[in-house]
Image: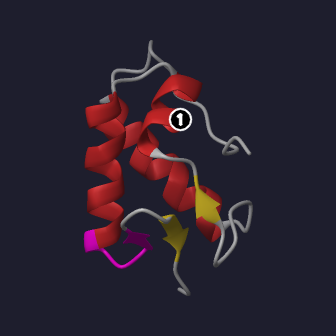
Amino acid sequence: MPLPIAIDPHDPTPIYAQLDRAIRFAIASGRIVTGQQLPTVRQLAVDLSVNANTVARVYLALERDGVVNTKRGVGTFVLEP
């Protein structure tokens, strides 16, 4: 299931910052719910036409901040706020 987010390549804000902000906003607004599995890094990169390293960087930052939890071989899931 694609995430309800979009990246604007014409926005001067770096892509990783747009993606980070969009995911956090989608979670805060309830469009992405607690326990929901996020797409894989590769899948989200393909869906948004961005580099996979950018998506991985955002997922790592979200995990560090306690927003998501990544279970190796299983997926990345949204945590309880």
Classify 37 as above or below 49.
Answer: below
Q: Residue at x 36, y 40 (%)?
A: 55
Residue that extends furthest to the front in the rendered view of this protein = 73
Residue that extends furthest to the top in the rendered view of this protein = 10
Q: Residue at x 42, y 42 (%)?
A: 41
Q: Residue at x 34, y 21 (%)?
A: 12
**Percent position of residue 75, x then y:** 49, 62
Kindly indicate the quadrant of the structure image that contains residue 31.
Answer: bottom right
User: Which residue is more in the foreground, 70 or 63?
Assistant: 70
**Percent position of residue 8, x then y:** 51, 21
User: Which residue is more in the foreground, 21 or 49?
Assistant: 49
**Is 77 on the left or on the right of 5, as rendered?**
left
Kindly indicate the quadrant of the structure image that contains residue 59.
Answer: bottom left
**Is 70 on the left or on the right of 31, as rendered?**
left
**Percent position of residue 52, x then y:** 34, 31
Whether 69 is among the magenta residues is: yes
**Is 13 on the left or on the right of 57, as rendered?**
right
User: Which residue is more in the foreground, 1 or 67?
Assistant: 1
Quadrant, the N terminus: top right
Amino acid on which disc 1 is placed: Gln
Q: Which residues are magenta?
A: 64-71
Residue that extends furthest to the bottom in the rendered view of this protein = 80
**Percent position of residue 24, x then y:** 50, 60
Classify 66 as above or below 19.
Answer: below
- Neighbor class of circle 1 (other Cα within 10 Å; few <14, some 14-19, many 20+) is some
Q: To which residue does mark 1 refer?
A: 43
